[in-house]
Amino acid sequence: MRFMILLKADQHSEAGEMPDEKLLTEMGRFNDELIKAGVMLAGEGLHPSSRGARVHFDKSGNVHVIDGPFAETKELLAGFWIWQLRSKEEAIAWVKRVPMPMKSGEAEIEIRQIFDMDDFGDAMTPELREQEARQRAALSG
């Protein structure tokens, strides 16, 4: 199973404050552990929402672009990992070991399982499975 691990932003990350050397060192060690264990597939930090945008699609088919920053810090992301694990419980165990990532001294990390092709049942036709396989091959090569 693949999981996306979502690190929620705080007022410091949204202000563009960069992590210090201590945190970067601790995160580097933690990421090394994840890689050595065969868990980590990807992981990145995100710039604050002031450098981003949201694209809203309404019922009429209109598309609206809203530039950041966005007001609700607790709804924003500061970074993510993608991990390959056997269960949500294993993901929770790894998340409990994450070095404190936020300057505020509080952090929230969300764990979400990523869909696999089999999760879509009969809607994932042989043609769609072939397309998915081609796309994954193109991304990895």
Image (cartoon, rainbow, N blue to C red):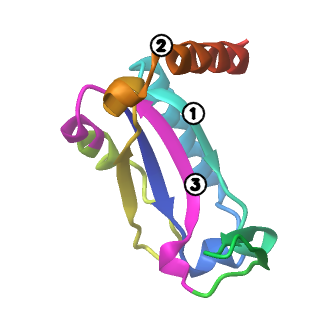
Which corner quadrant holds the C terminus?
top right
Q: Residue furthest left?
A: 89
In the image, what residue occupies the spot 58% across and 44% down?
25
Q: Which residues are magenta?
A: 72-91
Amino acid type indicated by mark 1: Ala
The quarter in which the N terminus is drawn is top left
| Comes first in the chain, label 2 or label 1 | 1
* Residue 83 can be seen, yes or no: yes
Location of residue 77 by image quarter: bottom right
- Residue 43 image offset from top left, x and y in percent: 58, 40
Q: Is residue 8 magenta?
A: no
Please report the residue visible at 65 percent of the width from the left and 13 percent of the height from the top: 134
Image coordinates for residue 99, horizontal then vertical, percent:
42, 52
- Evaluate if marks 3 and 1 touch, with contact meaning CB atoms under 8 Å apart: no
Determine the secondary structure under disc 3: strand
1 relative to 14 in the view: left or right: left
Give the class, few, some or many, for how many residues have Cα within 10 Å of label 2's Cα (few <14, many ≥20).
few
Q: Point out the tag, 2 or 3, that comes first from the N-terminus.
A: 3
**Residue 126 image label:** 2
Residue with the mark numbered 1: 42
